[in-house]
Amino acid sequence: MIETLRLARRTPGCLMLLIGNFAVAFGSNIVIPFLAVYLTREQHLSPVVVAMAITVKFWSQQGLSMLGGWIADRTGPVAAMCGGLLVRAVSYLLLLAASGSVQVVAACALLGLGGAIYVPASKAALVRLLGTGEQLRTVFALRSTANNVGCAVGPLVGSLLLLFADPRVGFVVTSAIYVALALLLLRLRSLAGAEEPAGENADTPAGAGGAAASTDRRKLAWVLACAFAFGFCYIQLEYALPVFTGSVQSSSLVGVLFTVNAIAVVLLQVPLNQYTSRISSSALVICGALLFMTTSFAAASTGSVGGLVASVLLFSAAEVLIDPRIDSEMANTVPAHRRGMAFGFIGTAMAVGGACANGLAALLSTDEGAPERQFWLWLVALSAGFAAILYVASFATRHRAGVKAGRETNAAAPV
């Protein structure tokens, strides 16, 4: 943890990017956890309209992440980050001023678009500053830690604003945070190469000697398949697990489980990734973490308090291992001038996986909407199957990479 922080401090602009990710998560969570309450109580919108608006926000952010990545590749990551922040700042003010369902849905779509532009650009900017060496994975883990701390602190501040001030204050505060952050991030433009869109041969992965100027399509497909599997499993924490917990235990336990997840992710993120950095095979780490999720789903199926807590702890450990590995593998798979869109592909693949999982949950739910025990057994089988298929498929990508490296070595040899 200390070594990773030192690396971030030594790398110009890295610490600012990490603080920026904390600020984005913090500002967003001042409002988002209470958005549905605000729209129903203050704006007097129907629950159907509110659900539609929040769904549009989610799919706008995930589905348009490829567009956001394309913008980052064309304009440079810093410009895209600042633009995404300003779009989000405007969208919060539009939500504040919206007086009807159409305006609210449009503002939520714009809010999602701002996130779709910012997230891939922020990852691409981090790779620009650090390169694609082994240290990138632990810094991505530190980035996730900053996000999760912001997600934990933001709701506390939002609840205080709701308690002691007008509910609209949170929207203004969040908008102001984003504008201020956009102005601060403009300082990164002065870093060498930080704002210039990369050319065909720029910033190839470390040690590649220019060999990564083209994308390994098999490896790209494998990384996106990992993102799909991760999204399929991860969405259970946001939908199936809370609903199931509320049906078999007290609803108050749901809040406890989310608190356990937030604390575990913050505490485990960097130490676990530093420990597993000794394992060079990302396939082994990702597929092993998917087996953690398999065990997590088996524990959840018991429905007991101990089983649910154990499920969240196992799930948290798997989450913090998979997320940085997918990002670092993507950074090493595609050349610099395509990384923004590549990171956008990750978000879209996760969204598709989450949609498939929610469809399965809907099919295997009771009349009250809670998943049946059979659903968790399906998840055990599917997550174990994902782990096995992805691990076997990884051998094909390794073989192709070895053949490609051999050809390039032979081509470079003097005749």
Image (cartoon, rainbow, N blue to C red):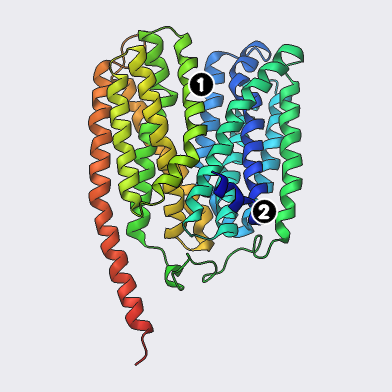
Q: Residue at x 59, y 48 (%)?
A: 122
Q: Nearer the viewer, residue 102 or 413?
A: 413
Q: Which residue is mark 1?
A: 259
Say what amino acid the circle numbered 1 marks: Thr
Residue 370 seen anywhere in this rendered image of the structure: no
What percent of the width, then of the height, locates residue 39?
63, 17
Residue 404 vs residue 136: left or right? left
Q: Which mark is residue 13?
A: 2
Farthest residue, direction top: 250
Q: Nearer the viewer, residue 357 or 98?
A: 357
Farthest residue, direction front: 2
What percent of the width, then of the height, locates residue 331?
47, 56
Q: Residue at x 59, y 47 (%)?
A: 5
Q: Quadrant of the N terminus?
A: top right
Determine which quarter of the picture holds residue 90.
Answer: top right
Determine which quarter of the picture holds residue 350.
Answer: top left
Q: Nearer the viewer, residue 113 or 227?
A: 227
Q: Do the residues bearing badges 1 and 2 touch, measured as CB atoms within 8 Å?
A: no
What percent of the width, then of the height, locates residue 75?
64, 58
In the depicted structure, whether residue 141 falls above or below residue 57 = below
Element under disc 1: helix
Q: Which mark is residue 204?
A: none
Q: Residue at x 48, y 9 (%)?
A: 252
Distance (Cα) linking label 1 and label 2: 31 Å
Residue 288 vs residue 163: left or right? left
Element under disc 2: loop
Q: Residue at x 38, y 48 (%)?
A: 224
Q: Quadrant of the C terminus?
A: bottom left
Q: Mark 1 or mark 2: which comes first in sequence?
A: 2
* Total marks placed: 2
